[in-house]
Image (cartoon, grey):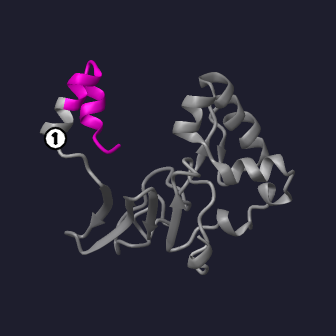
Amino acid sequence: WENIKCQCQAADSAEQAQCNLNNQPRSELVSMISCNDNEYQYNTAVIKDGYKLIVNGAAGSSPTLFCPGAQDLPNSSSSITQYTAPTGTVYTTPNTEYYEEWYLGTLIQVGFDLFDTLFGSACLEDLYENNSTDLDNAEYTPFQYAPYLLFNLAEDKVEACALDLSDPINN
């Protein structure tokens, strides 16, 4: 993501190196949805130094919470994250069924190295491998939506478990 233009357009490593010299790699990514002539923002995300901070994301794709007078989008969700399996099944939390159907299925399909680079989630794997009942507990704190969510993308690329913002020393 640092320089996706060069990674997508370069035919070989020499061309990619030259592209990187000509195009400054980005160190952060910021996105937000605004409404009412930029009076309100929701679903704001900042990615920097391997972390992703989401602000006012609990409205998901629904503008009505942060944009007075706005219309809900058809089929909008009240959750910021949905986990959709290849079968079309939508999960609001990454539970055991999701893990076995999508997570493991994708791992088998693409191989470990690519899977770990794109989708690896240490917290999700720990919950599953330790037979934790928290994996199927929709009330498990890291699965809860909040006005601020912080994810460690190096360890949790599918953003399954939000870090505990009340304990910044240990997160």
The single residue placed furthest to the bottom in the displayed view is 166
Amino acid carrying label 1: it is Asn
What is the x, y in percent for residue 45? 39, 61
What is the x, y in percent for residue 7? 30, 31
Q: Residue at x 67, y 35 (%)?
A: 102
The answer to whether residue 15 is left or right of residue 64 is left
What is the x, y in percent for residue 66? 39, 73
| Part of the protein shown in magenta | 1-17
Answer whether residue 41 is magenta in the image: no
Residue tagged by mark 1?
23
Locate the C terminus by quadrant.
Answer: bottom right
- Count the labels in the image: 1
Q: Residue at x 32, y 58 (%)?
A: 31
Residue 69 lies, with reference to residue 106, above or below; the image says below
The answer to whether residue 131 is left or right of residue 66 is right
Q: Main secondary structure of the magenta part?
A: helix
The single residue placed furthest to the left in the displayed view is 22
Estimate how packed mark 1 is, as few (under 14), some (14 to 19) or many (20 or more) residues with alpha carbons within 10 Å: few
